[in-house]
Image (tube, helix red, strand yellow):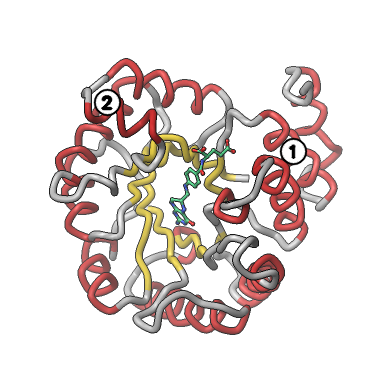
């Protein structure tokens, strides 16, 4: 599974404080920790800084890239912020995210088309957030078809069906699961991803909910996730679930993880 480390997000208090203080060391420590625990990409989000989001996003990217080899996942709904972020990023990033919202789609498409950037296609439209599996799959289909038509290789598209808190509607868990299954079955070569920790928002013992949710999603063929890679049980669950889902020939990843003591909690 492709892992995107979620921790460098200004909605988290310690990150907001580190950005305010321009604390390079603190950001680099969190980037390195996530990298060392298996993050393939480091999500960077400065969304709480209205008016300064571009400036702080550029600072975050430079700061992260001085300390780790993992590329960034540039997390902003604002195409302008994404564009200025891309101008300082070295190597091939992931863009988080394009959606079917008209203004966002039209501004971001020319930035991505014809490049080897990986792009998260978030299932949102001008009609708002999807409720059901069918809402999610309809948006995914439009996004995949139009991105592919515009020279974005299907292998570079990571569809995010949008995880909403299970505390707000008890159907959100399974509507999401069924969407993952339909998208992975219907569009061979595409990837799926999600902001997994959204599911537990508003509940106690959030980690437990996240850890159970990831196993269910892997059974439906989710192949990437934005998570906290410092959560050992989460990472161990991912390894075990992928082995059980038939994605680990001879159980060799599982056995390597055991030898490296990554399965010890
Ligand atoms: N889809 C896409 N991008 C996203 C989201 C998504 N980016 C933002 C968000 N949703 C995913 N990132 C986070 C980051 C932090 C948390 C939740 C989602 C969070 N963290 C806990 C905290 O800070 O206390 C810690 C959780 C833990 O320890 O496990 O809540 O949906 N494309």
Q: Quadrant of the N terminus?
A: top right
Q: CA distance from mark 1 to mark 2?
A: 30 Å
Q: Residue at x 68, y 28 (%)?
A: 232
Q: Residues within 10 Å of mark 2 (few under 14, many from 20)?
A: some
- Between disc 1 and disc 2, whose residue precedes? 2
The reply, left or right, for residue 200 in relation to residue 78 is right
Residue behind mark 2: 63
Mark 1 Cβ and ligand 1 under 8 Å apart: no
User: Mark 2 and mark 1 in contact (Cβ < 8 Å)?
Assistant: no
* Figure quadrant of residue 108: bottom left
Q: Is residue 248 above or below residue 218?
A: above
Relative depth, front residue between 174 and 179: 174
Q: Quadrant of the C terminus?
A: top right
* Figure quadrant of residue 28: top left
Place of residue 19 in the rendered image (x, y in percent of width and height, measured from the top left): 26, 30
Residue behind mark 1: 239
Place of residue 244 in the rendered image (x, y in percent of width and height, measured from the top left): 85, 48
Place of residue 22 in the rendered image (x, y in percent of width and height, measured from the top left): 21, 24
Q: Residue at x 69, y 41 (%)?
A: 205
Q: Residues within 10 Å of mark 1 (few under 14, many from 20)?
A: many
SS at mark 1 in the image: helix
* Figure quadrant of residue 126: bottom left
The reply, left or right, for residue 211 in relation to residue 41 is right
Q: Is residue 10 above or below residue 32?
A: below
Mark 2 Cβ and ligand 1 under 8 Å apart: no
The reply, left or right, for residue 13 in relation to residue 171 is left
Total numbered badges shown on the rendered structure: 2
Q: Which mark is residue 86?
A: none
Place of residue 172 in the rendered image (x, y in percent of width and height, measured from the top left): 64, 69
Q: Residue at x 72, y 23 (%)?
A: 262
């Amino acid at each position: 599974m492709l892992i995107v480390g979620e921790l460098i997000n200004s909605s988290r208090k310690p990150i907001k404080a580190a950005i305010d203080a321009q604390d390079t060391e603190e950001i680099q420590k969190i980037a390195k920790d996530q990298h060392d625990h298996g993050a393939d990409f480091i999500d960077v989000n400065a969304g709480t800084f209205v008016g300064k989001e571009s400036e702080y996003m550029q600072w975050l990217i430079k700061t992260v890239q001085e300390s780790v080899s993992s590329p960034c996942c540039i997390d902003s709904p604002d195409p302008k912020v994404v564009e200025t972020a891309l101008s300082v990023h070295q190597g091939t990033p992931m863009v988080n995210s394009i959606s079917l919202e008209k203004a966002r789609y039209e501004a971001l498409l020319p930035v991505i088309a014809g490049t080897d950037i990986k792009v998260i296609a978030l299932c949102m439209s001008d009609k708002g957030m999807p409720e059901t599996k069918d809402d999610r799959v309809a948006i995914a289909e439009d996004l995949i078809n139009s991105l592919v038509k515009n020279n974005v290789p299907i292998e570079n598209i990571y569809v995010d069906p949008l995880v909403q808190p299970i505390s707000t509607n008890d159907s959100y868990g399974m509507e999401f699961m069924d969407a993952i299954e339909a998208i992975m079955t219907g569009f061979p070569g595409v990837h799926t991803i999600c902001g997994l920790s959204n599911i537990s928002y508003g509940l106690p013992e959030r980690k437990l909910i996240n850890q159970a949710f990831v196993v269910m999603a892997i059974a439906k063929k989710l192949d990437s996730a934005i998570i906290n890679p410092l959560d050992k049980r989460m990472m161990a669950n991912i390894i075990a679930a992928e082995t059980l889902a038939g994605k680990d020939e001879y159980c060799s990843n599982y056995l390597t993880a055991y030898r490296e003591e990554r399965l010890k909690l």
